[in-house]
Image: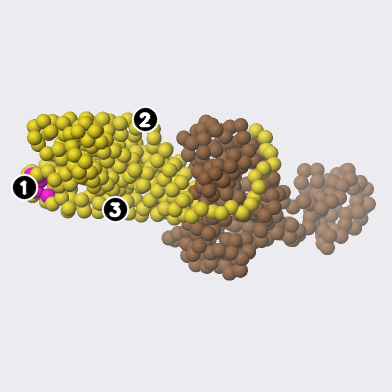
């Protein structure tokens, strides 16, 4: 290795603003997660949702059922939430844990950005991946069924709106969950397992306790029931859920925001410059 | 507070019961500054305060005329920071990583990429810049850390133990690189280290810390020229007898191998020649003892210990 004189010319550079700096972190994080694990999880979600929704809509048109119930069908299975959970665990688990583990967070926080800028950029990248998984396949199914002539343009538009509504709320919820677990460990594997385990165990426990006690309000702690209730309302499908769909959406968004705030609180206590 | 390079006005930082920095007041001009002290002396705490990552318990700080507490982003825009510990993203190439850090520092994307190439060439990683950082040796990683600290061309850089973990050759190369950096006009850097020889010939100002207290601060030349002046004497003959004769004349003498370290009252060398004549000894060498920052640091610690008593 040789040392050569610096070639670069020090000159006046117009520095970009904080938003652009945060966007640089967002882009980097978005690309960084494009590895085999997340790509496979997203691909699987797309495959399952596109196939289920398309066949259901095609079947509905033959049997005279509402096409919207066909679009809503992927949410009726636990498989959808499991797939989104896998995407969240593989994408979001490393978003903070990797930087804490490599201590790259030191470099970020010693630069001209706030902790909030950093966290919003990271959350944005995780949320975008979740949106791709939660909204993307639904939109493809809508496009496919419209192209095949199974649904009208107005139904297609309504279905896309419903996919976006459910997808955004789900993305906010799972982004918050993964961020908080990612902020408490240096290993993304632990954060991923914790995300998966926590959501599933809380969901199953809530269902069991609700079944035993007969208290349906406990189901507000079950992400599967929350998503299904919300989806049924968004797609205008008759629901047997005892929960209020608006309250379900509020609970999911609130939990996501509170957990993201917890992640911020946790990061603010990290020793940025260690001995 | 007026705008110098660095200023601290009665700064104290306490962590629960531990006082990491105690009533630190110092003003440093632009240039190369050695932040020197043993581990746990408060160097890193001072860097954290200067970067605005910690609030002082009391007192005020100024970095390039800005208060790190009220204007942390302005300070960090003008400051580059090279941490002591590993902090790189192993899955990125050096050029991708340095360019990314340039963007987060506020450079437009194209400028950041261009600067990344230039600074990696500057630190001697031109050929290896597309390799993943995980494949780099410790020395190469240190160079990437330096490159990311200077990519946005900051007027001030904080370098925390830049030679840490390097083999002797790597250390020499890093110090040579810092020497080149110090000669680039308009750039100042603070070299934080517990390895005092690293600062020799590299820094023009020094800030000596011990147990959170300021021992000395200012120009290296002024600090090294202060205090007792020693003279090194080399003779042909019986060194011990010569030393005893000098002592008998009231001159303080230390035998250091074949040399004598003599403290002459008023710097008058006449006594040495009188003793040489009396003892029939030939003086082969007579010259001032060259004081190092390490000598200064040790004498300061010694002085502080004497003042504080047993």
Earlier-in-chain disc, 2 versus 3: 2
Figure chain in brown: B
Q: Is residue A205 left or right of residue B92?
A: left
Residue B40 coordinates in the image, percent (x, y): 53, 52
Q: Which mark is residue B87?
A: none
Residue A245 coordinates in the image, percent (x, y): 15, 50
User: Which residue position is annotated with label 2?
Assistant: A36
Categorize mark 1 by other alpha carbons within 10 Å: few (<14), some (14-19), many (20+). few
- Is residue B189 shown in magenta? no
Residue at 69%, 45% in the rendered image = B180
* Residue in the foreground of this view, choosing between B147 and B201: B147
Chain A, which colour?
yellow
Span of residues in magenta: A239-243
User: Which residue position is annotated with label 1?
Assistant: A214
Residue at 50%, 58% in the rendered image = B73
Q: Main secondary structure of the magenta part?
A: loop
Q: Is residue B138 left or right of residue A88?
A: right
Earlier-in-chain disc, 1 versus 2: 2
In terms of secondary structure, where does tag 3 sit?
A: helix
Q: Which quadrant is home to the C terminus of chain B?
A: bottom right
CA–CA distance in space, label 3 to label 1 = 29 Å
User: Which residue position is annotated with label 3?
Assistant: A257
In this rendering, do the residues under marks 2 and 3 share a single chain? yes
């Amino acid at each position: 290795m040789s040392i050569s004189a610096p070639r670069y010319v020090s000159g006046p550079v117009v520095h970009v603003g904080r938003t652009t700096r945060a966007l640089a972190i967002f882009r980097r994080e978005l690309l960084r997660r494009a590895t085999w694990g997340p790509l496979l999880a997203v691909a699987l979600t797309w495959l399952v949702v596109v196939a289920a929704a398309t066949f259901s809509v095609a079947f509905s048109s033959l049997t005279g059922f509402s096409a919207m119930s066909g679009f809503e069908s992927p949410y009726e299975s636990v498989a959808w939430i499991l797939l989104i959970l896998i995407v969240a665990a593989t994408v979001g688990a490393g978003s903070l844990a990797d930087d804490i583990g490599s201590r790259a967070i030191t470099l970020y926080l010693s630069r001209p950005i706030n902790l909030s800028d950093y966290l919003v950029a990271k959350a944005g990248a995780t949320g975008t991946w979740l949106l791709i998984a939660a909204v993307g396949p639904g939109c493809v199914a809508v496009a496919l069924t419209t192209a095949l002539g199974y649904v009208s343009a107005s139904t297609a538009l309504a279905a896309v709106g419903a996919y976006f509504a459910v997808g955004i709320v789900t993305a906010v919820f799972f982004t918050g969950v993964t961020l908080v677990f990612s902020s408490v460990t240096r290993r993304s594997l632990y954060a991923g397992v914790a995300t998966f385990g926590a959501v599933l165990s809380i969901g199953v426990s809530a269902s069991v306790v609700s079944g035993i006690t007969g208290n349906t309000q406990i189901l507000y702690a079950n992400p599967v029931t929350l998503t299904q209730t919300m989806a049924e309302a968004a797609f205008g499908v008759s629901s047997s859920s005892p929960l209020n769909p608006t309250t379900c959406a509020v609970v999911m968004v609130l939990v996501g925001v509170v957990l993201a705030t917890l992640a911020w609180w946790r990061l603010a206590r990290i020793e940025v410059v260690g001995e | 507070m007026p705008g110098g390079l660095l200023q601290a006005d009665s700064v104290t930082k306490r962590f629960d019961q531990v006082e990491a920095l105690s009533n630190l007041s110092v003003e440093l001009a632009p240039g190369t500054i050695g932040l020197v002290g043993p581990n746990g002396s408060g160097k890193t705490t001072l860097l954290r305060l200067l970067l605005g990552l910690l609030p002082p318990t009391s007192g005020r700080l100024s970095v390039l005329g800005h208060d790190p507490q009220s204007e942390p982003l302005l300070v960090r825009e003008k400051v580059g920071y090279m941490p002591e510990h590993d902090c790189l993203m192993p899955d990125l190439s050096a050029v991708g990583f340095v360019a990314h850090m340039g963007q987060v520092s506020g450079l437009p994307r194209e400028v950041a990429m261009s600067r990344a190439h230039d600074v990696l060439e500057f630190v001697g990683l031109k050929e290896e810049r597309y390799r993943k950082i995980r494949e780099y040796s410790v020395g190469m990683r240190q160079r990437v850390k330096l490159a990311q600290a200077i990519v946005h061309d900051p007027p001030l850089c904080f370098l925390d133990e830049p030679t840490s973990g390097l083999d002797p050759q790597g250390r020499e190369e890093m110090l040579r690189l810092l020497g080149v950096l110090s000669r680039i006009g308009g750039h100042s850097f603070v070299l934080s280290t517990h390895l005092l020889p690293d600062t020799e010939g590299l820094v023009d100002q020094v800030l000596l810390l011990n147990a959170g207290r300021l021992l000395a601060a200012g120009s290296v030349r002024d600090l090294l020229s202060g205090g007792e002046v020693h003279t090194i004497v080399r003779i042909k003959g019986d060194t011990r007898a010569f030393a005893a004769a000098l002592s008998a004349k009231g001159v303080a003498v230390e035998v250091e191998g074949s040399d004598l370290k003599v403290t002459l009252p008023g710097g008058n060398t006449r006594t040495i020649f009188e003793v040489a004549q009396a003892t029939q000894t030939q003086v082969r060498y007579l010259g001032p003892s060259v004081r190092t920052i390490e000598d200064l640091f040790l004498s300061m610690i010694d002085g502080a210990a004497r003042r504080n008593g047993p």
